[in-house]
């Protein structure tokens, strides 16, 4: 069992939890993920490591309340115990040899982008962070990003916070102002990563994307996270989750992700009813 030692609501649909998991914390790196189950009969879901503290033996996860298991997890409180918390899994984000990087995060994907920016900053890399949200109420980790970024650009779709526009608008402006990057690391919704990759391809800038949005089982056994990269089949959870953004077939990945939405909605409705009535499965 893995005890929840801290819980924080970041916005109306996003929750941060700090979990006591010393063995995971000992080896965790940015870009990796854990697989958890809330209880013995629960669904196994992958969640990316948002932070870790090796001395305290804790791992931080940040998740959006979108499916049945995240709804169950969000209902848990400090002192409650998560049944399974396995990891770290996946390949860490490669940070060696970089001196100047733009980290681009969108929505809840910022929870994955932040630890990458934090590690790069700790290595002495110049970090320009460009993060985007639909509106002010959905902003997360603003102070955390500012603390590890040499340049911080906050964008919003409706102009209610930061600059009005998309992350691609801010990134293009930085590039055209003369900024030169060894690499762009983009993490967020599939459409966002697609258009960031199309933009950077214009300028010949290496771009890494995290294909966490299409992971389901987290071990490669279910095959649901398969995608095409450079014309070859890959599995996001075991071959990634980081891939060359210029090689990913995003249209195929988005079509595959959409297949599961009806099942997710049905499961979410079932759990919501259970939570309202206090019933048990």
Image: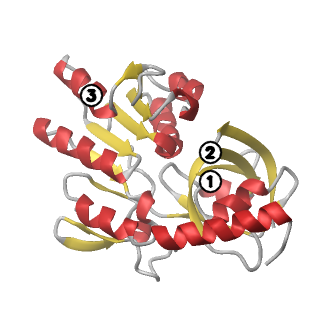
Nearest to N terminus: mark 3 or mark 2: 2
Q: Between marks 3 and 1, how big is the CA–CA gap? A: 28 Å
Nearest to N terminus: mark 3 or mark 1: 1
Please tell me in which quadrant of the rendered image residue 258 appears: bottom left
Assign a secondary structure to mark 2: strand
Extreme bottom residue here?
221
**Which quadrant of the figure contains the C terminus?**
bottom right
The location of residue 55, given as percent across then percent down, is 73, 44
Along the horizontal axis of the image, is 14 left or right of 205?
Answer: right
Name the mark on residue 14.
Answer: 2
Q: Estimate how packed mark 2 is, as few (under 14), some (14 to 19) or many (20 or more) residues with alpha carbons within 10 Å.
A: many
Name the mark on residue 169.
Answer: 3
Nearest to N terminus: mark 2 or mark 1: 2
Assign a secondary structure to mark 1: loop
Of 48 and 181, the residue lying toward us: 48
The location of residue 59, given as percent across then percent down, is 68, 51
Which residue is painted at 27% across and 38% down in the image? 183
Relative to 42, residue 122 above or below: above
Which residue is painted at 55% across and 23% down in the image? 147
Residue 10 in view here: yes
Name the mark on residue 65.
Answer: 1
| Disc 2 and disc 1 in contact, CB within 8 angstroms | yes
Relative to 214, residue 140 above or below: above
């Amino acid at each position: 069992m893995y005890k929840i030692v801290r819980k924080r609501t970041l916005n109306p649909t996003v929750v941060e939890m700090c979990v006591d998991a010393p063995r995971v914390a000992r080896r965790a790196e940015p870009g990796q993920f854990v697989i958890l189950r809330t209880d013995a009969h629960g669904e196994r879901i992958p969640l990316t490591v948002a932070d870790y503290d090796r001395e305290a033996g804790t791992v931080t996860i940040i998740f959006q309340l979108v499916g049945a298991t995240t709804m169950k997890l969000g209902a848990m409180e400090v002192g409650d115990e998560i049944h399974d918390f396995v990891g770290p899994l996946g390949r860490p984000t490669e940070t060696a040899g970089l001196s100047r990087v733009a980290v681009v995060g969108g929505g809840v994907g910022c929870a994955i982008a932040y630890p990458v920016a934090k590690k790069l900053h700790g290595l002495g890399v110049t970090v320009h962070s460009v993060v985007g949200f639909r509106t002010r109420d959905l902003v997360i980790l603003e102070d955390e990003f500012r603390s590890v970024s040499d340049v911080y650009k906050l964008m919003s779709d409706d102009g209610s916070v930061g600059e009005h526009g998309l992350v691609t608008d801010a990134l293009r402006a930085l590039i055209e102002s003369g900024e030169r990057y060894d690499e762009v690391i983009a993490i967020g919704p599939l459409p966002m990563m697609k258009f960031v990759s199309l933009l950077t391809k214009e300028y010949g800038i290496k771009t890494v994307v995290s294909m966490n949005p299409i992971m389901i089982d987290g071990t490669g056994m279910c095959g649901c996270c398969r995608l095409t990269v450079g014309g070859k089949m890959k599995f996001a959870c075991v071959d990634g989750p980081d891939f060359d953004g210029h090689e990913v077939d995003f249209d195929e990945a988005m079509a595959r992700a959409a297949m599961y939405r009806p099942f997710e909605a049905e499961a979410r409705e079932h759990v919501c009813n259970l939570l309202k009535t206090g019933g048990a499965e």
